[in-house]
């Protein structure tokens, strides 16, 4: 089905993204995978190309648009290229809204120009060793010392954790913490007592640096409070819908691409003297995946438009996230199976997509959390 949500401007932007990937990412990606981290020059190149800070006002160096379709184009093209390690979506769509929506004028002048140029790489630190999707379980504390915050605690599984120059830390600012006692504290590179642990060794997305972070009596200036004191829970709930949409968009794009390359593979690969595509079982597998992708695409495109118009709610974002990522997982598994032994070889895109994509049903809120959000809304 012909997609109808993009304009000529979006199509031109898609070509820009593809050119960027061809020139600045793909020639270096295998080395980044071996290194376990992306070169900082890639972030600077993204800034020069205008791929950072779509929603940041032009006065701070951004694109000045809230059109989520630009982010969707970026996510789709990076997914098709198989390059999730350069986490521009995390920077733009997850962290960007906190800075544009909550920062003071002074904070915006201090952080947003570098955010848009690629000189400031960002991360958000929520997850802790004992608290994953459960924000109520956060133990990291920020104690008010009058002229500064004293930050203590640890975080884990933090994307961009090694490269990040600016980390938004979710911390308790009351003894109880939880929904009414969490705040967002911004920690900048070089702060005394801020230490990075190991670059975690994952089964996929090897070039996307994911780290442990430690805060030992870190003195953070009072002016680095982001948003309202004790207001982090509401701030987080407000912005999680966009994060989940970004993950969902990547999920359906991955499923579609895997279906595309597998369809071509079974046409070319022979078994028992004829192409695999001549076997009824193979045709049924392809038919089922094609139908699932088409139905999911229709729903996701509607969600993309609604989100661009400011109309998408948290429940439908949760529906999109769990459904698209679970579809991605199923399609990756089935497509690998259809590739046979070759599908298990890392030189084949389907193998890498299988391991790179497995995290999709986990981060940004697990499938189980998404279902809980939806179920509560229907049964409250």
Image (tube, rainbow, N blue to C red):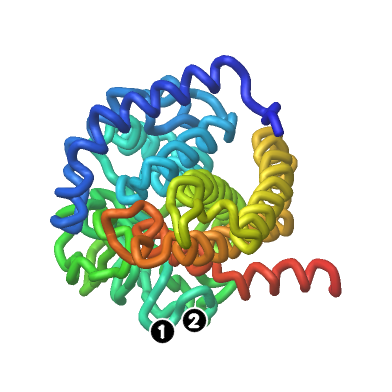
The residue depicted at 47 percent of the width and 62 percent of the height is 272
Q: CA distance from mark 2 to mark 1?
A: 7 Å
The residue depicted at 50 percent of the width and 59 percent of the height is 335
Q: Disc 1 designates what residue?
A: 130
Quarter the N terminus occupies = top right
Asked if residue 173 can be seen in this view, the reply is: yes
Categorize mark 1 by other alpha carbons within 10 Å: few (<14), some (14-19), many (20+): few
Categorize mark 2 by other alpha carbons within 10 Å: few (<14), some (14-19), many (20+): some
Q: Disc 2 designates what residue?
A: 137
| Of marks 2 and 1, the one in the foreground | 1
Q: Nearer the viewer, residue 115 or 16?
A: 16
Q: Nearer the viewer, residue 311 or 154?
A: 311
Asked if residue 183 can be seen in this view, the reply is: no
266 relative to 58, above or below: below
Q: Position of residue 370 (x, y in %)?
A: 65, 68
Q: Is residue 149 left or right of residue 283?
A: left
Q: Position of residue 85 (x, y in %)?
A: 31, 50
Query: In the picture, residue 45 is in which quadrant?
Result: top left
Per the image, label 1 sits on a secondary structure element best described as loop
């Amino acid at each position: 089905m012909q997609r109808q949500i993009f304009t000529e401007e979006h199509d031109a932007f898609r070509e820009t993204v593809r050119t960027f990937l061809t020139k600045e990412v793909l020639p270096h990606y295998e080395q980044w995978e071996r290194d376990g981290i992306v070169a900082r020059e890639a972030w600077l190149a993204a800034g020069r190309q205008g791929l950072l800070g779509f929603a940041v006002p032009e006065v701070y160096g951004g694109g000045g648009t809230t059109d989520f379709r630009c982010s969707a184009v970026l996510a789709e093209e990076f997914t098709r290229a198989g390059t999730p390690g350069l986490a521009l979506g995390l920077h733009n769509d997850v962290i960007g809204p906190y800075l544009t929506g909550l920062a003071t004028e002074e904070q915006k002048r201090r952080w947003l120009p570098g955010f848009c140029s690629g000189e400031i790489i960002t991360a958000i630190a929520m997850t802790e060793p004992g608290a994953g999707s459960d924000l109520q379980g956060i133990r990291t504390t920020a104690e008010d010392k009058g002229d500064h915050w004293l930050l203590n605690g640890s975080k884990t599984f933090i994307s961009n954790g090694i490269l990040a120059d600016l980390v938004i830390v979710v911390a308790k600012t009351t003894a109880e913490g939880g929904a009414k006692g969490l705040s967002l504290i911004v920690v900048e590179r070089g702060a005394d007592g801020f230490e990075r642990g190991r670059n975690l060794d994952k089964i996929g997305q090897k070039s996307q640096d994911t780290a442990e972070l430690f805060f030992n009596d870190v003195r953070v200036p009072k002016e680095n409070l982001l948003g309202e004191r004790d207001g982090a829970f509401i701030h987080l709930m407000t912005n999680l819908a966009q994060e989940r949409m970004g993950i969902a968009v990547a999920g359906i794009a991955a499923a579609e691409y895997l279906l595309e390359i597998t369809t071509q593979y079974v046409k070319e690969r022979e078994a028992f003297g004829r192409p695999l595509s001549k076997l009824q079982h193979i045709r049924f597998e392809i038919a089922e995946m094609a139908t699932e992708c088409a139905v999911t695409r229709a729903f996701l495109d509607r969600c993309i438009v609604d989100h661009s118009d400011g109309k998408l709610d948290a429940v439908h974002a949760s529906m999109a996230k769990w459904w698209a990522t679970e579809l991605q997982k199923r399609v990756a598994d089935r497509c690998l199976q259809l590739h046979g032994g070759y599908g298990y070889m890392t030189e084949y895109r389907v193998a890498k997509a299988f391991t790179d994509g497995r995290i999709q049903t986990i981060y940004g809120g697990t499938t189980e959390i998404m279902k809980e959000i939806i179920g509560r809304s229907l049964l409250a």
